[in-house]
Amino acid sequence: MALVHRLISVGIAVAVPAAVFFASGNVAIEFIVLGAVIGFAYWYWGPTGTLL
């Protein structure tokens, strides 16, 4: 289960800049950072989430 969780978080981190690239044709650094932040957040909090 941990492997699947890691793969999903990496997939999210890659999907954000990929979607921006397909939509606009180029990728700026902020979208790479945004994908990394969202992927890291999913990895850290997981699918169940947590109360902040």
Image (spheres, helix red, strand yellow):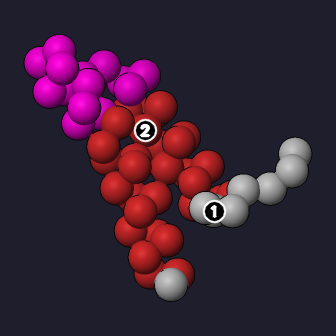
Residue range corresponding to the magenta coloring: 17-31
- Percent across and percent down for residue 25 are 12, 18
Q: Which mark is residue 46?
A: 1
**Real-space Cα separation, disc 1 to disc 2, in angstroms:** 16 Å
Is 24 above or below relative to 36? above
At x 86%, y 50%, the residue is 51
12 on left or right of 17:
right
Which of the image's four quarters has the C terminus? top right
Q: Amino acid at mark 2?
A: Gly
39 on left or right of 51:
left
Q: Residues within 10 Å of mark 1 (few under 14, many from 20)?
A: some
- Sooner in the amino-acid sequence: mark 1 or mark 2: 2
49 on left or right of 5:
right
Which of the 4 quarters of the picture holds residue 15?
Answer: top left
Element type at marker 2?
Answer: helix
At x 61%, y 61%, the residue is 47
- Percent across and percent down for residue 16 are 35, 36
Does the magenta segment cover residue 20?
yes
Q: Which residue is mark 2?
A: 35
